[in-house]
Image: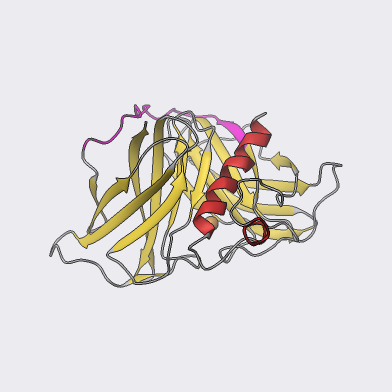
Amino acid sequence: MRHFIIPLLILSTLLISACNSIKVPKSTMDHQMSATPTNVVPTNSEWKISDHPKANEELPVSILIMDKAGNPIKSFETVHEKKMHLFIVSKDLSYFSHIHPEYKGNGEFDITTVFPSGGDFKLLSEFTPKGGGDPSVESKWVQIEGEPAKGVPLIPDKKLTKVIEDKKISLSFVNLKAGETSHLTFTIHDAKTNKPIKDLEPYLGAMGHAVSMSGDAEKYLHIHPMTMEGNGPKVTFMTIFPDKGIYKIWGQFQQKGKVFTVPFVIRVS
Ligand SMILES: [Cu+2]
């Protein structure tokens, strides 16, 4: 069931967000914003990571993408400048990483990463086999040996303003109801001067990216901004949260060649 639901969620997000973004998935155009996902290529995956993966060590991770018959898929679309986007989160969602495995050919993607502590981590890859109009998703839980991090309880933020790397970022939304269209706006100021930041740069082909996960790390949404206009201080995203509950959302933006990530915990009612 999970394998079916997750692509469906991403699809609905992409279908909606695509209306106002520059890159419109084929299925959106074909189906006029219908919520029926028809263009996700069904996939299987095989993940290779050492037998006893340890925290704080360089660990090679290999992901083989196959079709349902188990044959490697050989060609992939480049989406947001990459053939694969890989997200790694700890079970409590306190750790987040967004990286790009290298395509080795014959369905295989490789990357080396360091897990910051022992414990359970979810690896979630997003890619689009050639001809697919919307991304496919494959994920894997891994258990990392080593001292576990002190778990961070997932509590909705009371204050939706954070200071990250000299930037003050606020999150606001219109309609945070499950199953309905939500707009999320990140507003970015210089933390020292309080001046609005107007020189954001495109990051992976958009004025920002946002990834959201449900509190249990089972539901995943990759949310693209609604427009490419302007370079801050506001970037608005549109999505549909599938269910009520707590979600963590990570906004990622770039300024002066540097990417910064801002996390918020929200409650969808
Ligand atoms: Cu990416």
| Looking at the image, residue 115 lies above or below residue 216 | below
x and y, in percent, of residue 80 in the image: 56, 63
Residue at (68%, 47%) from the top-left corner? 62
Whether residue 136 sits left or right of residue 171 in the image: it is right
Q: Is residue 59 visible?
A: no
| Looking at the image, residue 40 lies above or below residue 233 | above
Majority secondary structure of magenta residues = loop
x and y, in percent, of residue 260 in the image: 36, 57
Whether residue 165 sits left or right of residue 205 in the image: it is left
| Looking at the image, residue 228 lies above or below residue 179 | below
Q: Nearer the viewer, residue 80 or 88?
A: 80
Q: Nearer the viewer, residue 142 or 236?
A: 236
Decide whether residue 179 is among the magenta residues. Answer: no
Residue 249, picture quadrant: top left
Q: Which residues are magenta?
A: 140-158
Whether residue 135 sits left or right of residue 265 in the image: it is right
Decide whether residue 148 is among the magenta residues. Answer: yes
x and y, in percent, of residue 227 in the image: 42, 66
Residue at (35%, 29%) from the top-left corner? 152
Chosen colour scheme? secondary structure
Instruction: Report the quarter where the C terminus lies.
Output: top left
